[in-house]
Amino acid sequence: MTATTLASPTLAAPTLGHKGAGLFAATLTIAGRAVKKALRTPQLIVAGTLQGLMFLIIFRYVFGGAISQTGTMSYVDFVVPGFVATTVLFSGMGSAIAIAEDLHEGIIDRLRSLPAPSLAIICGRVLGDMALTTWSLTVTTAIGFAVGFRVHSGVAQALLAFVLCVVFGFALSWLFVALGFVAGSPQAAQSTAFLVFPFTFVSSAFVPVSTMPSWMQGFAAHQPVTEMVNSVRILTEGPAAQAVLGHSVGAYLPWATVWALLIVLICAPFSIARLRRG
Amino acid sequence: MPALIEALGLQKHFGKTTALAGIDLALPEGKITAILGPNGAGKTTLVRAVATLIRPDAGRLLVLGHDSVRESMAVRRLIGLAGQSAAVEPAMTGRENLAMVARLYGARRIAARAAADQVLSQLGLDDAADRLVRTYSGGMRRRLDLGASLVGSPRLLLLDEPTSGLDPRSRIELWDAIRVLGAAGTDVVLTTQYLDEADQLAARIVIIDQGRVIAEGTPGELKSEAGTDRVELRTRDGEGLALAAATLAGFGDAAPEIDVATHRFSVATSDGPRSLAIAATRLNDAGVEIEDLTLRRPTLDEVFLSLTGHAATAEPAEKPTKRRKGESK
């Protein structure tokens, strides 16, 4: 701890190869850190899970009784796909904050000064987010089943719906990384909530879009969250959901895919450019 | 042998702010160098350019012979960087933090762990190695941060204001660690706005102000450039002061400064230690009772003032407070 310890003659610096890590190894290392951080901050996981649980209970049991526009579908079957799909938005907010924190604390600078591809800093973040998002999706799906949600299509389609949520989570992770770079400080990154809330609620996630005023429907019916939620809804609930929504999955799934692709194509180059600019 | 850092007309602008206005510099290997300057002088920008984090707008920058832009990966293999804040992950242990950095230098798992352990014991953090960093004190975090910059055994260690925000005790501990590294053969370039820090640690000082190098040399050279030595004395009372002033009338190079309130007498001299002996003899012969008699060399504060026309600690009025965020925009 003091100068005497430091001055010991065995002080030769450790020698590493200096070759630098490859993209794959570096990405895994950085993703590992993101996952460790989440696991060791259990209050975040607990708070996130409780918040989701509360949301679902409120919608299922408090508002659910009054929402009677879901046709032959029970409200719980209508709302759980929306609830699960929008989980990815809430877990994405954490990644915007994490990137902003890393920028603010100089961790991005430290990582960029190391002989590893800087691309790994973002890829590692996204990969770590994927792991965490998949976990959140699993938990919210389990909660959904616990409050009475049932799949009325088939196992394969339900699994496809789950994979679709993971893919959407992947795309949004790039969006939130980009937002983290734009925000620059953790406090500013908190305000991504102002983006998350309208996209979550002005969508078909919790109520049918047809019940909204017409000026709102234009946005609500075509924004990415709705395309995504409706795809998941039809994939898990089959004909009943199709009857309520008035279209087949073919009307939503292609758009959901296009949106996901578009988000990645815009946000990935932007984030990489911001990272390299320093 | 290539210079440690060689800069030619290095410029960097952030919007309307000029961070580097044309830095020319050639630092030789084998010394601890301090880059000294007030807030907003461009110290951090210079270090970030050396660390390949920003691309200069104009000019050339070579680090151990490698171009910082075209051969950035080669530069990164040779440097270790510790910034102004402790850039370590609070939710990991000290050992995990260092092993992660070692992994990014390309070490395999076992080698990374060994390198981490070695640095931890080097910095006296063995006991805390398996504790989460969020339980560390501020001083320990900064030491771990220094460790993270060392774990890749860099040829050149870049420390950006390594002791800012530390309490005096942690500051001295970090100084010791830096001195030992310098003595063990690691080249160290550190920035500081504390003159005493540069004076304590560095064999070579580069003073920059408003994005330019305004002076360069050893602490001794800079001090003798800036002005003359002064003989200073203090007496017990005003009577003694008057007697001392009368005895030393005509002594020194200029009119003395006399401070009646604190009973101090001070005069510039170019004779160095000899003048101190002469003054002491005259005062003794005249029977003047004095409390203190010293030969004082100019402080770096005075050097700075004479070079820039403003004090080192004052912020230049025309520039915003320098923070990493402000600079990166």
Image: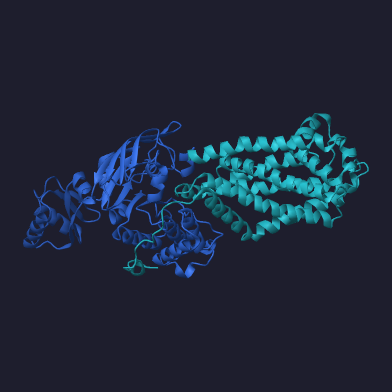
Chain colours: A cyan, B blue
Q: Is residue B185 left or right of residue B294?
A: right
User: Front-most of B144 and B270?
Assistant: B144
Q: How many marks?
A: 0
User: Front-most of B178 and A262?
Assistant: A262
Taking the spot 79% from the left edge, 30% from the top edge, the residue there is A218
Q: Is residue A153 left or right of residue B106?
A: right
Taking the spot 46% from the left edge, 44% from the top edge, the residue there is B324
Name which quarter of the figure residue B16 lies in.
top left
Name which quarter of the figure residue B3 lies in.
top left
Rendering coords of residue B152 (x, y %): 41, 56
Taking the spot 22% from the left edge, 53% from the top edge, the residue there is B260
Residue pushed farthest front? A156
Residue B160 visible in this rendered orientation of the protein = no
A141 up-or-down from B321: above or below: below
Rendering coords of residue B319 (x, y %): 41, 37
Rendering coords of residue A20 (x, y %): 45, 51
Q: Is residue A90 left or right of residue B228?
A: right
Residue pushed farthest left? B285
Quadrant where the N terminus of chain A is found in the figure: bottom left
Residue B151 visible in this rendered orientation of the protein = yes
Rendering coords of residue B226 (x, y %): 21, 44
Q: Is residue B232 left or right of residue A168?
A: left
